[in-house]
Amino acid sequence: MPKPPTKAQALAAALTARIIEGDLPPGAWLSPERQLAEEHDVDRSTVRRALQLLAEQKRVTLHPGVGAQVRTDEPVHRDAGDITRQVGSWRGFHVSAQRSGHEPYTEVTACLTQADVTLARWLGIPLGTEVLERARIQGLVGLYPVQTATTWVLMDIVEQIPVLREENTGPGGIYSRLAETGYEIQFEESVNCRLPRQDEQDTLAIDSDEPVLTTWRRAYDQNERIIEVTHRVVVGSRHELIYRYGASS
């Protein structure tokens, strides 16, 4: 049975809710410690611990002797077209982050794995089929991680494009390598929202009550065959998804 939150964690969660809802907008100053203690019926040491938690979560900036101020960092704005648009050496998250005025980073690991029930369904392959897994943690330099993104690629594609096994697949990433090999890719994406699992809390440096967006994206080739699937877990407050489409289908 999970432990109940401490008073400091509960206060931090209450202040986080006010920040997310806009009651405490970017740049706003939180009430002084004494006032927060009175409003929430806690002692000042609890307030200080709660503010430290908010600072660790990159929600506020602590100014010694002055107070706590809601951070003014803008979230990454991701245009759906960034998936395929190459700018310089980058696509996807890096393009969106740079457009939002941030310096992005990506940590990559690649290994072979076997498809579990969920992955087999998304890729349309038998359970236990070997695939290449490319796991990434992506974030903003000097700030925080924004998302995890894990891609699974069919092995016959990997055999055609061996560089996909490497951490660095070259300018434009795997979609540029696919295009160079003659693949014409179309995407299908499913978006959902939930609370994070414990491993996601640890990786993304968030609390259990911070909503995350989850996306499953299939990549189809010109023959309508699914050749890779990507699963993303995105901190909702750190990333905004933007879609543009016409009025007629």
Image: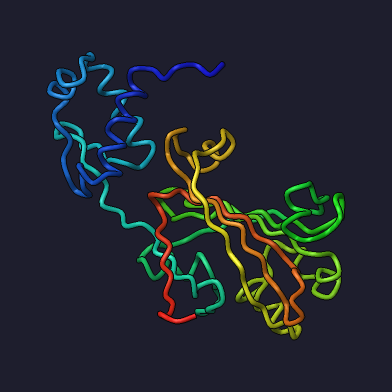
Image coords of residue 174 (percent x, y): 67, 71
- Work out whether 39 lies above or below 137: above
Which residue is pictured at 42% across the width and 75% down the height? 244
Q: Identify which residue, 4 or 245, lies in the foreground.
A: 245
Residue 152, quarter of picture: bottom right
Q: How many marks?
A: 0
121 to the left or right of 83: right
- Work out whether 222 lies above or below 139: below
Image coords of residue 117 (percent x, y): 78, 47
Residue lying furthest front = 248
Which residue is pictured at 60% across the width and 75% down the height? 172
Figure colour scheme = rainbow
130 to the left or right of 99: right
Q: Identify which residue, 241 or 245, lies in the foreground.
A: 245
Residue 30, quarter of picture: top left
Which residue is pictured at 54% across the width and 73% down the height? 90
Image coords of residue 79 (percent x, y): 44, 70
- Work out whether 67 lies above or below 143: above
- Position of the N terminus, as image quadrant, is top right
Residue 171, quarter of picture: bottom right
Which residue is pictured at 23% across the width and 46% down the height? 22
4 to the left or right of 75: right
Image coords of residue 241 (percent x, y): 43, 62
- Work out whether 23 lies above or below 156: above
